[in-house]
Image (spheres, grey):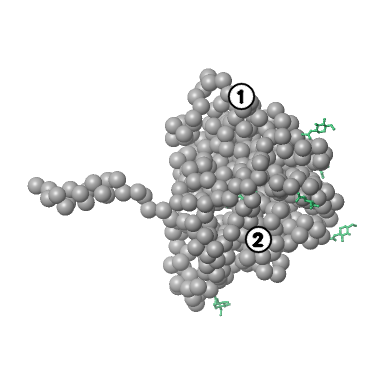
């Protein structure tokens, strides 16, 4: 007969929440302890084998305040966890014997007509100087030039718009290096117009307008170190401001932070040439959806979005296979935020290596998944059944963008 204590133990284990690993254990720590590495110091760059390794490394070398600013997410960080874990719910349906020997040659893509070597880019993230006090974002510019990938500079970068522009290369797949500029709109719009003018003069090719930060956000992990948000102003964000920005610049304006099919459709109505699905790395609102869930909601309710505009995405992407899953739903290119901030602790070589790891994982995983052309991945490569309950709007429902 079961005692009450044993029974309650059984119940507890039955309802126990799965433990959460910020990085899965792939042996990094065990390996490092077998070398002359000492805890609390930066490991060697050569020992970074996967993107999550850079998080571990940054945690060793950055102080608590700086690491927390990069690592923090909203409130209980349940969305941060979901961003990392959701990928494992969608399995690959590999078709074998498909001759994938040329898949390497299909990594290159275009974003808004510009040529890039791979469908991955550096997302805009503030305070690059925490990782590399001297070079800060200049490493993102130079690594992106070396690797022919896109860098989207953050308004609250440690370096100025002009310093970032001055580091651009003249010799990339596009000729002079292409950068996009992220902006927040200020309550005083003349401040915004000044920023837009400066970025245009500095040669930015598109604006990424962040729409998911209308107010301060609850960040317990950062608050412990009294670390404020880079953007803590409450401002009246509306689609009318989108129209006003359009009146101020001829460059494409990409709304960043789309989390529903309705807003995706509305952005298209407003004339966006590209949209950016993201929950801001779960830094704004807990229980906001991951990019895989958002992309699937759009795919199920308005799949034409992916052909009418270019769809960028980020939040929780850590592996080549994560990138492939988003591409299979119609996403054009995929960004990463934290991983590059962490990699920047190793300077230019670290950021460059992180881009190279992603490229080689995308190619290797594509081959394993039977994908012949990374630009034309059939959605049937994915078993999406597990995401079905997360799709709020059901097939056949009329979906419009109008508010
Ligand atoms: C330290 C840090 C600072 C960020 N700053 C900005 C910012 O200034 N503007 C913005 O639009 N997004 C910002 N983001 C969000 C990123 O652009 C991106 O959406 C997010 O990091 C993606 O999630 P990931 O970190 O899991 O890859 C920031 C993210 C981090 C980690
Ligand atoms: C460990 O020793 C090697 C060889 O002496 C040296 O090159 C390396 O920098 C050391 N690594 C660390 C983390 O101290
Ligand atoms: C790129 O070209 C411009 C204009 O000719 C020049 O001012 C700049 O120094 C060059 N940049 C580099 C990195 O060579
Ligand atoms: C992009 O590449 C294509 C094909 O190689 C080329 O024709 C085009 O001029 C390139 N675009 C830019 C902006 O360099
Ligand atoms: C708005 O910003 C402009 C430009 O920075 C400044 O001159 C002006 O005084 C500001 N207006 C208000 C109401 O703060
Ligand atoms: C944009 O400019 C046009 C033409 O000057 C004007 O009619 C319109 O009201 C402006 N829109 C906004 C939102 O400022
Ligand atoms: C892709 O190219 C890299 C480097 O040239 C090579 O190491 C890798 O094996 C290739 N991968 C595939 C899937 O062909």
Q: Is residue 222 visible?
A: yes
Q: Residue furthest left?
A: 1
User: Which residue is rendered at x = 49% and y = 30% of the image?
Assistant: 392
Q: Residues within 10 Å of mark 1 (few under 14, many from 20)?
A: some
Q: Say which of 17 and 266 sits in front.
A: 266
User: Which residue is rendered at x = 43% and y = 55% of the image?
Assistant: 21
Q: CA separation, marks 1 and 2?
A: 38 Å
Residue labelled with disc 2: 127
Point out residue 324 in the picture as x, y percentages from the top left corner: 58, 42
**Mark 2 residue's CB less than 8 Å from ligand 1:** yes
Q: Quadrant of residue 292?
A: top right
Q: Is residue 354 visible?
A: no
Which disc number belongs to residue 178? none
| Labels in figure, total | 2
Q: Say which of 6 and 372 sits in front.
A: 6
Q: Say which of 96 and 268 sits in front.
A: 268
- The answer to whether residue 19 is above or below residue 33 is above
Point out residue 220 in the picture as x, y percentages from the top left corner: 49, 56
- The answer to whether residue 301 is above or below residue 382 is above
Residue labelled with disc 1: 400
């Amino acid at each position: 007969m079961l005692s009450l204590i044993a029974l309650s133990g059984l119940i507890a284990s039955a309802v126990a929440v799965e433990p959460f690993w910020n990085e899965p254990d792939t042996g990094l720590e065990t390996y490092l302890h077998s070398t002359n590495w000492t805890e609390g110091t930066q490991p060697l760059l050569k020992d970074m084998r996967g993107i999550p390794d850079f998080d571990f490394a940054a945690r060793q070398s950055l102080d608590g305040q700086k690491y927390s600013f990069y690592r923090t997410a909203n409130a209980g960080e349940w969305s941060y966890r979901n961003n990392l874990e959701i990928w494992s719910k969608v399995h690959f349906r590999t078709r074998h014997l498909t001759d994938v020997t040329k898949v390497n040659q299909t990594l290159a893509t275009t974003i808004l007509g510009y040529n890039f070597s791979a469908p991955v880019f550096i997302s805009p993230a503030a305070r690059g100087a925490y990782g590399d006090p001297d070079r800060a974002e200049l490493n993102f510019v130079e690594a992106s030039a070396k690797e022919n990938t896109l860098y989207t500079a953050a308004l609250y970068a440690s370096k100025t718009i002009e310093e970032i522009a001055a580091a651009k290369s003249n010799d990339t797949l596009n000729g002079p290096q292409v950068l996009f500029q992220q902006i927040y709109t200020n309550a005083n719009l003349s401040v915004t117009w000044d920023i837009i003018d400066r970025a245009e003069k500095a040669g930015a090719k598109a604006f990424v307008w962040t729409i998911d930060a209308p107010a301060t956000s609850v960040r317990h992990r950062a608050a412990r170190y009294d670390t404020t948000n880079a953007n803590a102003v409450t401002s009246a964000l509306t689609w009318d401001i989108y129209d006003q920005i359009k009146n101020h610049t001829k460059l494409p304006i990409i709304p960043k932070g789309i989390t529903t099919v309705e807003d995706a459709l509305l952005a298209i109505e407003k004339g966006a040439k590209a949209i950016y699905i993201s929950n801001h790395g779960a830094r704004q609102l807990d229980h906001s959806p991951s990019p895989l869930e958002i992309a699937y909601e759009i795919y199920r309710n308005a799949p034409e979005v992916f052909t009418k505009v270019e769809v960028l995405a980020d939040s929780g992407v850590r592996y080549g296979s994560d990138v492939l899953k988003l591409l299979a739903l119609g996403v054009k290119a995929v960004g990463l935020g934290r991983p590059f901030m962490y990699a920047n602790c190793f300077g230019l070589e670290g950021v460059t290596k992180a881009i190279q790891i992603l490229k080689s994982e995308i190619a290797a995983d594509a081959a394993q998944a039977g994908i012949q052309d990374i630009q034309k991945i059939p959605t049937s490569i994915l078993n999406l059944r597990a995401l079905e309950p997360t799709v709020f709007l059901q097939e056949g429902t009329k979906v419009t963008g109008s508010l």
